Image (cartoon, helix red, strand yellow):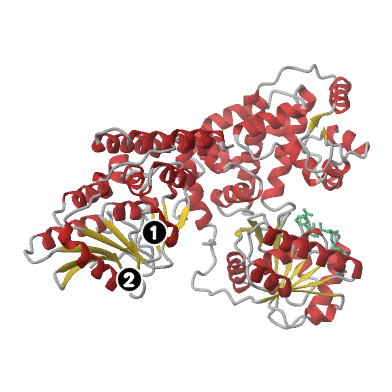
Amino acid sequence: MPVSSQIVNDIGVIVFSNPPLNPISATAGIPQGIAAELDALEAQPGVRAIVLAAEGRMFSAGADISEFDRNAAEVGGPIRALIARLDACRLPLVAAIQGSALGGGLEVALGCDYRVAAQDARFALPEVTLGLIPGAGGTQRLPRLTGAVRALEWIAAGSTITAKTAHEAGLADALAEGDLRAAALAFAARVAADGRRRPRDLPLNTEGFDEAVAALRAKPQNPGLRMAVEAAIAAVSAGQGADFDAGLAEEYRIFDALLVSEPARALRYAFGAERAVARVPGLDPALRAAEIRRVAVIGAGTMGIGISLAIVQAGLQARVIDLNPEALERARARSEATILRNRDRGRLSEAAATAQIAALSYSSDFSDVKGHDLIIEAVFEDMGVKEKVFTELDRLADPGTILASNTSTLDVDRIADFTARPEDVVGLHFFSPANLMKLLEVVRGAKTSQQTLATVMGFARQIRKVGVVAGVCDGFIGNRMFEEYLRQAYLLLEEGALPAQVDGAMERWGMAMGPLRTMDLAGQDIGWNIRKRRAAEQPDRPYSRVPDLICEQGWFGQKTGRGYYIYAEPGAKPGVDPEVEAMIVAESARLGLVRRQISDEEIVERCLFALTNEGARLLEEGIAARPLDIDTVWMNGYGFPRFRGGPMFYADRVGLPKVAARMAEFAKGNQGWAWAAAPLITRLNTEGRGFAALNEGAK
Ligand code: NAD
């Protein structure tokens, strides 16, 4: 039974169970079950109060997000009806909260008169992160417990609140010293005689509210979240009239409208996609990841430093091995400085910082690769160097150790064949800075074993990265698509746009950083090398000389003070560079192109549909298993806005027929021959389907 009840010394106890997260799901019968038990207990003359408790490690993770794509009445209805039933109860109600009380779960607890919490309980109304607001009274009841200012602050940020803070703020009425259920029963017995104290009947403290709203509006916010934050302000404001039910109705109205909004749809999709990537098609789900504790990182350069930091931040040991003792010393100094900076900024305790530093060790002796569960190679991007390293690893590493390469562009299958154990070899493509970036492309070689793949996916989770499986090709999922995105940015410059317009259009649309600024940040010399190679390898794709002209000046971006923009210092705001603009205009003339006014809309469509088209090719080739894998790569590694859901999801929302029609238009323009639609897009259009069809069953 998902919901049951009993009576303990005149106190009714309702317990619901929907493991492991206890969502208040109507499909699982939870809200209906609680209401039925309430009816039964209320009908018992001896019962003086009721405790509402949940089985398992957490009280409730809230509503079931997988049910949110239904119509608004079905989504909000059952929890709202349950809370209305709690409101109508004649007996005092006490919620007993362990683990987390999130979203709809917390709203149910707010429908009770009191909340008794375990010491380590956590509270949150995180709906804003899904482009929503609480939609079952959270914006109306929480302010009456904590004051409107605090409630708005928490709701607008989706903050997680500790039990201690919740207690101080009035959200929790007591913290359990020992057994939570016993503490809640004792609390209920104490308050039983007082009658009800419904949050809806409490006075509302609005002191400082206008200032809090102004401060919230002054904060920079991405356009996707801004909408939900404004909605939160509107809903909490609506609760300040005399009529509680009118405020509640306004909250319901706002929630129901947001539920079907584009940002909320995309954020829900992103949430599901980031979980679905861990379920790798074709990988036996029964396979357990082997435990990884000791990791060796070969190469103490930019990536070796970032990767080893990511490892020790997750509580594992990292041994960094480099033949160059100076590189090792530099790595040690930089890593320690990063850890100490995190400590000084309050992100790490003194003890945690000391432990991280102690977990890092350095060696210039290659035989130290022994005794590790996983070895990650991050040496120079050169097949000859990789061959030397993997031959040595094969000779020296313990049997069963996973051998991973962080290569960005080289063939992982060839690297695997440098060893006699290609089944243990895999690509682990980190993004820079590797200690901060969430994405980890896991490159599955032709001979990579299922067990190796399962273990490195587990390792990705362990070090708190989002692991996405990709097949072997030059650039894998992310960088292969990024090249097409950049290609359009360069062609737009030739045709009439200037760098600030291209970047501005993409950033206003929601990208964290425009393509040209991104190249200035990453360092254009790396891209230049790859482009030179591509010009020979891919004669079937158009080539723009614009970035080469800039590189030929030695202007590689922030690190040289100049790139597409001028930088007063690294990290400084990009300034317009008239010389670069003149070079671009001269290149248009050389090509015989009459520069034209290009709309932001065209910039956005060309850059994005180039991504979609290349993404479709990756799906055809099996490099990416599902559109959601591609979208997750873009949202976690390239600053693609989550509220747009990734390039494949976005194309579906635009409509694939329209995407194909726009591509056909672009095909008539400069270098239009590059705009041949991927056959998959044509096929999906013929079948009247979108990319979403290829995700089905995955979530
Ligand atoms: P880097 O030049 O900063 O560092 C490479 C390090 O490898 C140097 O310290 C060097 O001394 C060491 N090294 C060279 N040969 C060695 C050998 N035989 N044995 C041991 N150590 C050796 O390079 P990086 O930017 O850190 O890149 C490393 C790898 O990561 C490359 O394959 C690169 O393509 C890949 N990668 C780089 C980035 C990035 O943004 N920089 C991102 C993803 C992947």
* Res 319 quadrant in image: bottom right
Q: Position of residue 541 (x, y in %)?
A: 77, 37
* Res 177 quadrant in image: bottom left
Q: Position of residue 273 (x, y in %)?
A: 51, 52
Q: Is mark 1 within 8 Å of ligand 1?
A: no
Residue 362 left/right relative to 16: right
Q: Would you say residue 122 is visible in this rendering?
A: yes
Q: Name which residue lies at 46% across and 34% down.
A: 230
Q: Amino acid at mark 2?
A: Leu
- For the residue pair 87 and 661, the one nearer the viewer reads as 87
Q: Quadrant of ligand 1?
A: bottom right
Q: Name which residue lies at 89% across and 71% down.
A: 323
Residue 490 left/right relative to 180: right
Q: Which residue position is annotated with label 1?
A: 167
Residue 623 left/right relative to 542: left
Q: Amino acid at mark 1?
A: His
Identify the element where label 2 is drawn: helix
- Say how many tags the image has: 2
Where is 242 relative to 409, above or below?
Answer: above
Pick whichever of labels 1 and 2 is earlier in the sequence.
1
What is the distance, in whole Å, between disc 1 and disc 2 at their CAs? Answer: 15 Å
Where is 411 relative to 236, above or below?
Answer: below
Q: Residue furthest right?
A: 553
Residue 439: mark: none
Q: Position of residue 543 (x, y in %)?
A: 81, 35
Q: Which residue position is annotated with label 2?
A: 180
